[in-house]
Amino acid sequence: MNKPLIDVAYIAKLARIELTDEETARFTEDLSQVLDYVTQLQQWDTDGIEPMYHPVPTFDALRSDEPQPGLTPEDALMNAPQASAQQIRVPKVVESA
């Protein structure tokens, strides 16, 4: 079977990446090796095998969603450079019309 030819220069142009001739040759060889590996993987019969989302089974990866105590307004404003009426005061960024 013929190996597909990858036009790395064309792909780099689409991605707007400037490559030297040396980089283009190296990436062409690297991508060719990746395709060779994928071709090897296609030889295996994977019918009836469920896809894996992670190579190691994970259990209880997420904590339960339970309410936790938050900061008091005083604690939240403790390190604010400026505060007014229990709010952080920031410089105006929008001019009025």
Image (cartoon, rainbow, N blue to C red):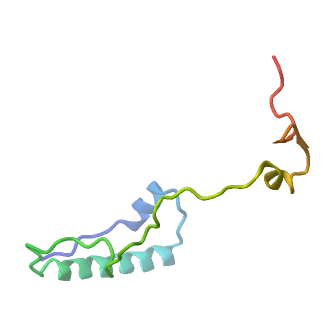
**Residue 91 located left or right of residue 18:** right
Q: Which is nearer the eye, 40 or 95?
A: 95
Residue at 65% across / 57% down in the picture? 69
| Number of marks in picture | 0
The N terminus lies in which quarter of the figure? Answer: bottom left
Quadrant of the drawing holding the C terminus = top right
Examine the rendered structure and indicate whether residue 92 appears above or below residue 45.
Answer: above
Image-quadrant location for residue 5: bottom left
Q: Position of residue 58 (x, y in %)?
A: 35, 77
Observer-nearest of 83 and 3: 83
Looking at the image, the residue that sits furthest to the top is 97
Q: Residue at the spot x=79%, y=53% of the render? A: 76
Picture quadrant where residue 4 is located: bottom left
Q: Position of residue 74 (x, y in %)?
A: 83, 51
Residue 87 against residue 19 in the figure, above or below: above
Residue lying at 24% horizontally and 77% vertically, measured from the top left: 38
Q: Position of residue 65 (x, y in %)?
A: 48, 58
Q: Quick one: 4 or 80, which is closer to the camera?
A: 80
Horizontal arrangement in the rendering, residue 37 relative to residue 73 (left or right): left
Of residue 56 and residue 40, the one placed in the foreground of this image is: 56
Q: Is residue 16 left or right of residue 72?
A: left
Snapshot quadrant of residue 70: bottom right
Q: Position of residue 41 (x, y in %)?
A: 19, 80
